Each structure stands twice: as C-alpha cells, then as structure tokens.
Amino acid sequence: MTPMDLTAIDHVLATTRSVRKRLDFDRPVPPEVIEECLRLAIQAPTGGNSQGWRWLVITDAEKRRALAELYREIATPYLKAGLGDAGEVTAQQGRVIDSATYLSEHLHEVPVHVIPCLHGELDALPNFAAAGSYGSIIPAMWSFQLALRSRGLGSVLTTLHLPLADRAAELLEIPSGVTQVGLIPVAYFTGEDFKPAVRRPVEEITYWNGWKQAR
Ligand SMILES: Cc1cc2nc3c(=O)[nH]c(=O)nc-3n(C[C@H](O)[C@H](O)[C@H](O)COP(=O)(O)O)c2cc1C
C-alpha cells in the first residue's frame, strides 16, 4: 500500500475553514475544477448506496444575483438579531456574524454557487429517516469542500436561503420532490494558508462506554 501523506491530509482536515472574506470574486473558476471536486465528493457514503444526490452549479450572474437576494431576505434580519445587545455576543461569535454579514452582502459576487440537492421530501421525517437522508449528502458536501480547499479554493456551507427554497426552485427549475440541502459559494481564496480553529478539547466531549464516562 502507498503510504499516506498524513501531514498533508491532516493539514487539510484541520484547516478547512468557512471562507467568506477571503473569496476572490475576480478569479474565474474553471468548470473542470468543480467537476473534479464533485467527482471526489461522490465517493462519499450514502444510506443503502442510494446516491440520490444532484449537484446544481450556478455560474450565471443573474441567477447568482437572484439567489443572493433570496439569501439576504433571511440573512439580514437573522444576522442583525444575532448581534443583539453587544454584551451578549462573544468575540468569536461577533467575528462569525461580521464574516457572515460580509458574505451575505457579497454573495452575488462569488463566481460559483453550488446547491446540493437530494431526491425526496425531507420535511417532517422521523429522526432515523432524517439522519439517513441528510447523512446521505452532507458527507459528500464536506468532501467537496475538502477537495476545493486542497486545490486553493474556499467555500462555506450555508443554509440561510432554505426557508425560501421554493423560490430558488422556481428560479432554477428544480422539480417538486427534490430537497435543497444548502448553498455553497465557491471561489479561489486569497492570502496565506488557514489555521486550525479553536475547539473544546476532544477529551471533554468524548465519552467512553457510557455517557460522561472518561476513558
Ligand atoms: C449546517 C451548517 C449551516 C451553516 N450555515 C451557514 C450560513 O447560512 N451562512 C454562513 O455564513 N455560514 C454558515 N455556516 C458556517 C458556520 O458559521 C461555520 O462552520 C462556523 O462558524 C465554524 O467556522 P469554521 O467552519 O471556519 O470552523 C454553517 C455551517 C453548518 C455546519
């Protein structure tokens, strides 16, 4: 077996951030790069090997503008409410809101929007079915983001347009019975490399052989 380059693989796993402010709006993204990353993404697992995914890639400027307008209808009040009383927001949350607000204001400028879709109506599914459905596309969405990142492109998983998914469906001629699972803006990133994020120590959030039991 070829030895794996753990340094490179671990680096990609640890530093694939949500990229918003460092998206290069001016550098074109070749369609082949999107296809290459999607080809890798669809190696991800699906329940029962169902592969019910469809990937809608939007490069048309007018359609991206319309999607960004939909996104902002939800994002603007949501992000304003998130700011609330200045004292209630931690510095880290404040940075996320600031960055998310920037993305919202510039979404139409991001050269590629990808809407992962899944065959089936996922509203009101019982937990096991919901897990099986979303679990049959979200791993592939993350693989797509990892593949993009390792090729110098940034992305961020967004879900804020989903309350208006019907209007996005009309715009993009998505048939009924198909569920949109998010909207992933994609562009080359600018600047230096990314760093691992601060997370709670894994020992604190990992239990062994029973709830809250240490190893
Ligand atoms: C299910 C899900 C939904 C998200 N929705 C949005 C969104 O609508 N807009 C946005 O700007 N970021 C969104 N994010 C990105 C998160 O804000 C981001 O992952 C989080 O702040 C941690 O930052 P990091 O990904 O750089 O580690 C979403 C992430 C996930 C996993």
Image (cartoon, grey):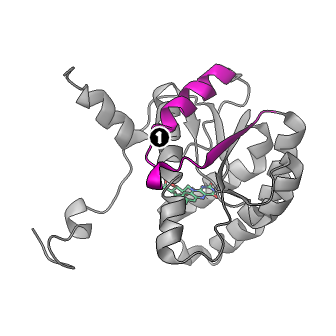
**Where 188 sits versus 145, above or below?**
above
In front of the other: 174 or 147:
174
Q: Position of residue 108 (x, y in %)?
A: 80, 42
Q: Who's the residue at 21% across and 79% down the image?
A: 211
Write down which quadrant ligand 1 falls in: bottom right
Number of labelled discs? 1
Q: Is residue 36 among the parts visible in the rendering? A: yes
Disc 1 target residue: 143
Q: Is residue 195 visible?
A: no
Query: Would you say 199 lies left or right of 121 here?
Result: left
Does the closest atom of ligand 1 sit within 8 Å of the Cβ of label 1? no
Please tell me whether residue 35 belongs to the stretch shown in magenta.
yes
Q: Residue 200: give x, y in percent of width and height.
A: 30, 63
Judging depth in this view, the residue of 198 and 155 nearest the camera is 155
**For residue 80, what is the image quadrant?**
bottom right
Q: Which quarter of the rendering shows the C terminus?
A: bottom left
Write down the region rendered in magenta.
31-59
- Image quarter (top left, top right, bottom left or bottom right) of the N terminus: top left
Alpha-carbon neighbours of circle 1 within 10 Å: few (<14), some, or many (≥20)? many
Q: Nearer the viewer, residue 46 or 191?
A: 46
Reply above or below: 10 against 69.
above
Q: Residue at position x 74%, y 25% from top?
A: 26
Determine if the magenta segment contains residue 140. Answer: no
- Percent from the top left, x then y, of residue 153? 56, 30
Q: Residue at x 71, y 35 (%)?
A: 112
* Between 170 and 29, the one nearer to me in the picture: 170
The answer to which quarter of the image holds residue 163 is: bottom right
Instruction: Give, as a three-letter code, the residue at label 1.
Output: Ser
Which residue sits at x=44%, y=31%?
Answer: 193
